[in-house]
């Protein structure tokens, strides 16, 4: 019988597959992780709203008449959908595009710069991504809802 | 064959390297460039943005060609991204295949519509 060189350590909590219902409330996600999951969420949102995006592309470009219809959809609604709801969906798209755009540039920067691949830079650039995307969304959202 | 793995891998080879990782970056970069070009044309203009100005931007042939390549880039970029999402979260092969087929149909349909709109102007 040989003895163990080091005494066994007390068991530590292991996170393998996290459970969405029991672990998410206690799982601490760093800013870089929040940016990462929001990159996915914003991508999926834009994928699902692609027909709405192309509808906007279509009606705003096809003719003078359809351009007026495009504007009217945001102001007085379209069919049974009220204008404020269309504006809200557009605002969600604005956020998704801004977040995906800025987080994408962050990815590209980390791909070309070794200096950018550090824990510190990952943290600060994630904070900048979150702050910038939310700030620009607020600025453009205020314009969309006619606050200025 | 010489060493073709790890850091010695040829990124322009078939079925790896350029295909997903790099092509998603290149298509993303192209779409970012398009965004900046479109925004610049809207920002450096005077007066309210009406139909004539908006349609005029896309009437130029170079803008049509650029927008067409952006639609193609979007198609591929989103395909890689959505396929990654299905591979990460959907384990049953049948459901994953069905979702991948849905993604292809959805994306090709949307791209066709967008291209048709582009050449109406």
Image (cartoon, coloured by chain):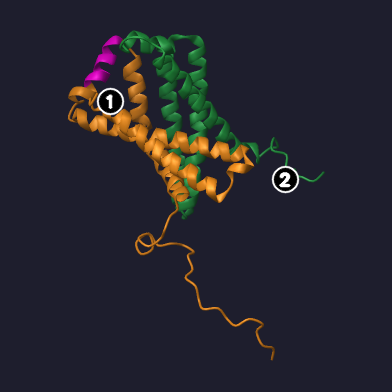
Say which of B109 and A140 sits in front. Answer: A140
> Separation of disc 1 and disc 2 at Cα?
49 Å
Q: Which residue is mark 1?
A: A143
| Pair 1/2: label in front | 1
Pointer 1 chain: A
Residue at left offset 44%, top offset 20%: B115
The secondary element bearing badge 2 is classed as: helix
Residue A67 is one of the magenta-drawn residues: yes
Residue A83 image point, x, y percent: 20, 28
Query: In the rendered image of this protein, does residue A118 appear above or below residue B102?
Result: below
Residue A103 image point, x, y percent: 47, 38
Residue at left offset 57%, top offset 31%: B26
The colour one sees for chain A in the rendered image is: orange
Query: In the rendered image of this protein, does residue B98 appear above or below residue A79?
Result: below
Confirm whether residue B99 shows in the render. no
The colour one sees for chain B in the rendered image is: green
Say which of A88 and B10 sits in front. Answer: A88
Magenta residues, dominant SS class: helix
Q: Which residue is mark 2?
A: B7
Q: Which residues are magenta?
A: A64-72
Pointer 2 chain: B
**Quarter containing the C terminus of chain B:** top left
Q: State which quadrant residue B50 falls in.
A: top left
């Amino acid at each position: 019988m040989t003895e163990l060189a080091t005494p066994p350590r007390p068991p530590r909590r292991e996170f393998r597959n996290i459970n969405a219902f029991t672990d998410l409330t206690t799982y601490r996600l760093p800013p870089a992780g929040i940016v990462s999951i929001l990159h996915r969420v914003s991508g999926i949102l834009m994928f699902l709203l692609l027909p709405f995006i192309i509808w906007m592309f279509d009606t705003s470009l096809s003719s003078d008449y359809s351009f007026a219809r495009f504007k009217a959809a945001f102001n007085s609604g379209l069919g049974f959908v009220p204008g404020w709801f269309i504006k809200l969906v557009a605002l969600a798209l604005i956020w998704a595009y801004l977040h995906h755009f800025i987080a994408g540039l962050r990815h590209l920067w980390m791909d070309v710069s070794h200096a950018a691949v550090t824990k510190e830079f990952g943290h600060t650039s994630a904070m900048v991504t979150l702050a910038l995307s939310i700030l620009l969304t607020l600025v453009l959202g205020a314009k969309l809802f006619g606050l200025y | 064959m010489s060493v073709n793995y790890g850091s010695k891998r040829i990124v322009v080879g078939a079925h790896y390297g350029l295909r997903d990782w790099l092509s998603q970056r290149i298509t993303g970069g192209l779409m970012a460039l398009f965004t900046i070009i479109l925004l610049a044309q809207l920002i450096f203009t005077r007066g309210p943005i009406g139909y004539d100005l908006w349609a005029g931007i896309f009437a130029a042939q170079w803008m049509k060609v650029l927008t067409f390549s952006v639609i193609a880039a979007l198609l591929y970029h989103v395909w890689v991204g959505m396929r990654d999402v299905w591979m990460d979260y959907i384990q049953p092969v049948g459901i994953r295949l069905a979702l991948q087929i849905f993604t292809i149909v959805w994306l090709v349909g949307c791209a066709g519509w967008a291209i048709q709109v582009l050449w109406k102007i």
